[in-house]
Image: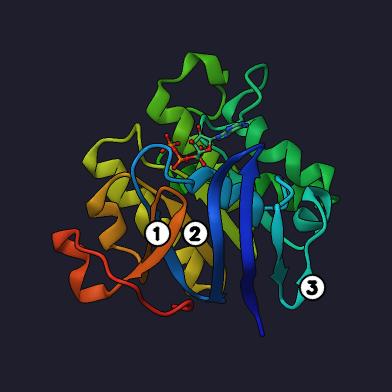
Amino acid sequence: MTGLRATSLSVSYGDLVALQPVDLDVPAGRFVAVTGPSGAGKTSLLWALAGALRPTQGEVRVDDVVIGDREQAAALGVVLVPQGNGLATALTAYENALVPLLAVGVRPAAARKRADDALAVVGLEESGGHLVEELSGGQQQRVALARAFAAHAHVLLADEPTSDLDATNRERMIAVMRAEADRGAVVVMSTHDPEAAARADAELALDQGVARWVPKERQRDGSHRAGPTHC
Ligand SMILES: Nc1ncnc2c1ncn2[C@@H]1O[C@H](COP(=O)(O)OP(=O)(O)OP(=O)(O)O)[C@@H](O)[C@H]1O
């Protein structure tokens, strides 16, 4: 199977069960929204899928390879855009997109083009020379997405990537995530925004750590019911 698969994946912090065991099967080319109120377990799920958090139970596979840790997941093309962006504030927007590519051995000319293209795609081609701390919160969020788009992810996991954006930029970022899925990536985005979630192929709703697929036709009225483990 090509894509992302989680089997009986659960996350606990001590006695607190943040994510009840969940099965997921997201094929390459799909764009999934993970929704739910604050504290529902969205970040815990994304971090576990990214190999950044050791699950309490279960496993994650990328193209049938079991993920052991974040380094291995990254080597398989699993890119995480964390909440709060995770940008290097001492670097410019352009350097934030460029440096990770150079670090994994992309040739400098190709890396520069990918960084330029990614900043253009998020509408920040004029801001590449600015230090991250000189940018607004929304612009920083777009730089974090540009860095992920430049990486040409196999699996793109974005934790509330549009929370600081106006409607125009939200639409633009969602269109780029859709394009990432269309070129064959698995895209998983957590969001509080029902309009953003409605643009995905499928919605996985979390409530107190319990995950349910939301039938596509029900997404707009916000109602949930148990659904399949795949999308
Ligand atoms: N490092 C941690 N240690 C202990 N508890 C944690 C930790 N991280 C998260 N939690 C708890 O796990 C639960 C799920 O948190 P999580 O961050 O996954 O939710 P979320 O849906 O992403 O929330 P938000 O929308 O506010 O980001 C919450 O009850 C939270 O307090």
Residue 65 bears which disc, if any?
3
Residue 115 horizontal/vertical position (percent): 62, 44
Color scheme of the displayed model: rainbow
Where does residue 223 sit, x and y in percent of width and height?
19, 63
* Tag shown at residue 188: 2
* Residue 7: quarter of image: bottom right
What element does badge 2 sit on? strand
Between disc 1 and disc 2, whose residue precedes? 1
Q: Residue furthest left?
A: 221
Q: Do the residues bearing badges 1 and 2 touch, measured as CB atoms within 8 Å?
A: yes
Q: Residue at x 48, y 76 (%)?
A: 229
Q: Position of residue 153 (x, y in %)?
A: 64, 59
Q: Position of residue 185 (x, y in %)?
A: 57, 69
Circle 1 residue: 33
Who is closer to the viewer here, 220 or 127?
220
Position of residue 155 in the picture relative to residue 29 (left or right): right
Residue 6 appears anywhere in the view: yes
Label 1, label 2: how far apart the Cα atoms are? 6 Å
- Residue at 77% in and 49% down: 70
Q: Secondary structure at mark 1?
A: strand
Of the numbered discs 3 and 2, the one sitting upstream in the chain is: 3
Residue flagged by tag 3: what amino acid is it? Val
What is the spatial separation of the Cα atoms under label 3 and label 2, in whole angstroms?
A: 18 Å
Q: Amino acid at mark 1?
A: Ala
Which three-letter amino acid code belongs to the residue tagged 2?
Val
Instruction: Reply above or below: 65 against 42.
Output: below
Q: 10 Å neighbourhood of mark 2: few (<14), some, or many (≥20)?
A: many
Whether ligand 1 has any atom under 8 Å from the Cβ at mark 3 is answered as no
